[in-house]
Amino acid sequence: MGSKMIFVALLLCLSLGVMAEDPYLFFEWHVSYGTIAPLGIPQQAILINGQFPGPLINCTSNNNIVVNVFNELDEPLLLSWTGVQQRKNSWQDGTPGTMCPIMPGTNYTYKFQVKDQIGTYYYFPTTGLQKAAGGIGMLKIHSRELIPVPFDWPADEYPVLLGDWYNKGHKTLKAILDSGRSIGRPAGVLINGKSGKVGDMVEQPLFTMEAGKTYRYRVCNVGLRNSINFRIQGHTLKLVEMEGSHTVQNVYDSLDIHVGQCMSVLVTANQAPKDYYLVASSRFAKRPDVAVAVIRYTNSNTPASPLLPPPPPENSAGIAWSINQFRSFRWNLTASAARPNPQGSYHYGKINITRTIKITNTRSVVNGKLRFGINGVSHVDSATPLKLSEYFGFADKEFQYNLVKDEAGGAGSSMVVAPSVVNATFRNFVEIIFENHEKTIQTWHLDGYSFFAVGIEPGRWSPDKRKNYNLVDGVSRHNIQVYPNSWAAVMTTLDNAGMWNLRSEMWERTYLGQQLYLSVLSPARSLRDEYNIPEAQQLCGIVKGLPKPALYAGA
C-alpha cells in the first residue's frame, strides 16, 4: 500500500473514531455525615460534597466515568450505579458481592464506561442501611450527537428524585433489622430531599418553566419501600424514556413509579402562567403520604391552587389501574439509540428460551429473627466478596453454588441462611418468572443487564401464560414490579460475564436476604468477554495480600 493510501486510511480511521478513545469525565467526591431535617426532625444524613441529594453525573453514551470517592464516614462504604450495565466489568458494580468496601478514612476510584447506553439512572450506597440516609444522586446518559432522539431537544432537563423517608437514622434502622424486627412504615415522602406541603411559603421553586416551551423531567424512585405516583398539577406527562429505552410516546395524567425505577417525561408549559404543584404520593400503603414542590412559570406571582390532582384508586382497583398502565408501556422500535443487540434481541420473541428460573419471594422467622429470601434461601454477605472468592479459586471456602433452585420447593421447607450464588451459562437466553404470594407489592432489579418486561398478571404463573406475553415491543429495562398475589415475566440474554446481583429493591428485604448473585463465566477466560481485575482493586477477606491470578488473554 502506497504512503498516500495509508494516509487516507489513517484519516478515515480518525474520522470514525477508531483510534480515539472515548471521552473521560472526572469527579472527586467526599462522603460525610451532615444534619438535615426533611420532615422537620433533625437527623444524621449521608452527604456527597456537602449535598443531599448528591451531585448529578451528566454524561454521554460511551463516556468513561472516573469517580474518586473519599470515605469520611465512620463505617465502610460502597456505591453502586443502578442500571449502568458495567459491560465486562462487574469489578466496579459496587455491591458487597463484587467489591471490598471503602474503609473509613480511605478513598477508592471507580472507573467504568457507560457503554452502549442512554437514559436515566441513579447511584446509591449499598452498605448496610446507608441508603436510608442519603448518598443518592442521579446519573443521566445522553445519546451521542450523531444519534437522533425521537423528540425535539427540550428547553431544559430537570432531575427529580422521589422516595419515602424514615425519621430514624440508618444506624438505628439497621439495629432494628439486626434485632429481628421490621423497620415498619416510612414517615413521609421526599422530592429532591424536601417534603413540601400545600400552602407552604416558597421563595425558590423546584423548577421554572417558560410558557410555550417543553421540558424533560427525569424521575426516579430512590426510596426504600413504597411505590410513588407522580403528577403535575394542570399538566400532562408524555413518556419518552424508561430505564434506558425510548418508549412509545403515550400521554398520562400521572405515573406509578415503583422502587428503583426511573423514567423521563416531556412536560409542555401550556397553561396559564402561575405556580403549579408537582405531587408525589405513596401507593398501596395503609397511610398514604404526600409531598409537593412548586413548578413556577417565568415571572409568575400567582400561587398554586391548593386543589391537588387526585391520586389513582387504591386497593384492588388501584392494582388493576397500575397493571393496565404497565401494559401501555411499549418500546419505541423506530428510535435510534446506543444499545447492544445480543442474539438479535430486537426480535427477542423469536429466540428459544434455554432456561426458566422461577423466583418466589419468601418470608420467615429464623432463630427468632425476621428473614426474607428467594425460593427458601436467605442471602448473607460473606467475609470475602463473592467475585473475589471465585476469581482467586476459593469459592468452595466461602459459598456453595445453586442453593436456590430454578423453582421454589414445597411449602413448609425451612429457610436456609447462606451466601447465595446461582451458576448461569454465558450467552444463554433465559426467562425469569417472579411470583409474589404476599399481600405487598415487590420490585426486583438485576445488575449487569437489561431485560424485556413481557408480562404481568394476577394469580400464579404456568407455561400456558406465555401466550399472553408481549413478544414484540416489551420495554427493555432493569427493574420490574410484582403486584400482590401476582407474577411478572422477563427475558434476557446473559451476554455480560461477571458476578451480578439480583435483588429486591425494598431495602429491608434486601438487607435481610431477598437477593442472590448470578455467576456468569465465559469459558474462554478472555478479554473479549471480561476485563481483568483492576490493578488497584482492593483485596480483603481470605484473598487479602495474595498475588493476583494470571491475567486474561487478549480479545
Image (cartoon, helix red, strand yellow):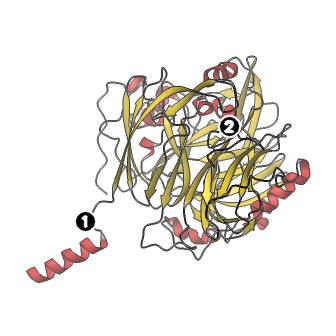
Considering the image in quadrants, where does the N terminus appear? Answer: bottom left
**Residue 485, x across and y down, in percent:** 84, 46
Residue at (37% x, 34% y) in the render: 108
Do the residues bearing badges 2 and 1 touch, measured as CB atoms within 8 Å?
A: no
Q: Secondary structure at mark 1?
A: loop
Q: Secondary structure at mark 2?
A: loop
Q: Which mark is residue 45?
A: none
Q: Is residue 166 above or below residue 440?
A: above
Residue type of the residue flagged with mark 1: Met
Q: Which mark is residue 19?
A: 1
**Residue 172, x across and y down, in percent:** 65, 20
* Label 2: how many Cα within 10 Å (few below 14, some 14–19, many 20+): many
Do we see residue 548 in this rendering? yes
Q: Is residue 486 above or below residue 475?
A: above
Marks 2 and 1 sit apart, C-alpha to C-alpha, by 44 Å
Q: Between residues 484 and 522, which one lies in front from this camera angle?
A: 484
Residue at (49% x, 58% y) in the render: 141
Considering the image in quadrants, where does the C terminus appear? Answer: bottom left
- N-term-proximal mark, 2 vs 1: 1
Q: Which residue is labeled 2 in the image?
A: 224
